[in-house]
Amino acid sequence: MKFVAILTIAIGLLTASQAMEKPSFHTQGTPTGKPTGKLKPGEYWWHPEISPEGPLMILISIPEQMMHVYRNGILIGRSTVSSGSKGHETPGGVFTILDKQQTYRSKKYDNAPMPNMQRLTWTGIAMHSGQLPGYAASHGCVRLPYDFSQLLFAMTSRGGTVVIGDSKTPTPYLASNPGLMLAPKDFSPEMLRPLARNDYDWRPERSPQGPITIVLSSADHAMYVYRNGNPIGRAEVEINSRGLTGRDRLGNHVFTMLEGTTGKPSRFTPKHEEARWMRVTSEGRPVDAETLASRLRFSPDFADKLANEMKPGTTVIVTDYPVVRKPTTDSTYFAAD
């Protein structure tokens, strides 16, 4: 996914033409000089100058009620949050910023103001300014200090990656099902046909521009490519089980492509250099991108076509869950609501 935006350090207040009334009940942020350690409700730490450019990833820990913001793999901001209360829990998983509006009011909850709204699902989950009592208290959204929500809003762009996890660590583990669950209608019948070895479909003209997301499913033995939320490609993937029958599971991980390369030829297409990646995992043992890649094989021609389109900010989601499934009445959709 492409979600890079250059932030000028001076951003913090809206211009007169953009100004909006600050609701009195929204927590005004309190900056702190501490990059680590416990923050009080409403406090945040913000230093984007540490990493001025590169792809952005937002990680939210529900138990810790904390947001961590990384740019090009480097921590540049932290903030307290307030997520969904009991019965309105904020769903875990991997999400995309679908929409952004500085001035917005809730259509579900009495026209309540939601300044600096960044939508994560089409069913009511978003990040926005709000009260921070020090515990989960929202109807499912992720509330932020008002000042911090302005700073974050100025930096992000549509298509950005947001990972909501259930670990207390600074880089939270993913929730129990981080995979996307996409209905077959998202693909044309031709793109859903069974794939033979080295087979693939490639239709970049379906969405010529926008951020790229790649979903790799060990259950499907397939890779799915989306651009700007639209499916543009699919390829058969062989998984090396390392001699263990049935051990083709890959775990559940999220990788974001960083600026720069390692200088080595890519394992999949020697015409390109190996990218640098930031990893978030739901596994107890860290798995780096190179180790994971060593277990995979797919069409070199497809790899070359894909590499030509990938840019810093591209997100790769690896999951042991099937991706394309028929929706049921109790289905939960992650990042595709």
Image (cartoon, grey):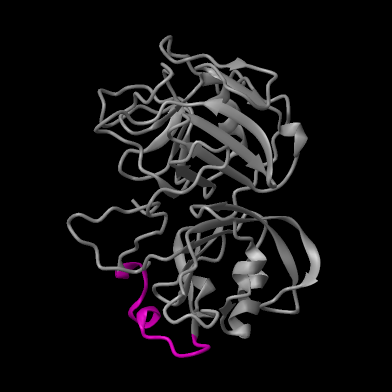
Q: Is residue 206 above or below residue 253?
A: below
Q: Is residue 46 magenta?
A: no
**In the rendered view, does 335 fall on the left or right side of 68?**
left
- Number of marks in picture: 0
Q: Is residue 195 magenta?
A: yes
Instruction: Spot the residue most to the top.
Output: 24
Q: Is residue 109 above or below residue 255?
A: above
Which residue is depicted at the point 43% across and 18% down? Answer: 134
Q: Quadrant of residue 138?
A: top left
Q: Position of residue 122 (x, y in %)?
A: 34, 45
Q: Quadrant of residue 33?
A: top right
Q: Position of residue 286 (x, y in %)?
A: 59, 55
Q: Is residue 98 above or below residue 90?
A: below
Q: Position of residue 76 (x, y in %)?
A: 68, 34
Span of residues in magenta: 184-199
Q: Which quadrant would the N terminus be assigned to in this image?
A: bottom right
Q: Quadrant of residue 245?
A: bottom left
Q: Is residue 283 above or below residue 250?
A: above
Q: Position of residue 236 (x, y in %)?
A: 48, 81
Instruction: Spot the residue most to the right.
Output: 263
**In the rendered view, does 220 fall on the left or right side of 159?**
left
Which residue is depicted at the point 63% across and 84% down? Answer: 300
Which residue is depicted at the point 69% across and 35% down? Answer: 7
Which residue is depicted at the point 66% across and 48% down? Answer: 55
Depth check, front residue: 180 or 229: 180
Instruction: Spot the residue most to the left.
Output: 329
**In the rendered view, does 224 fall on the left or right side of 304?**
left
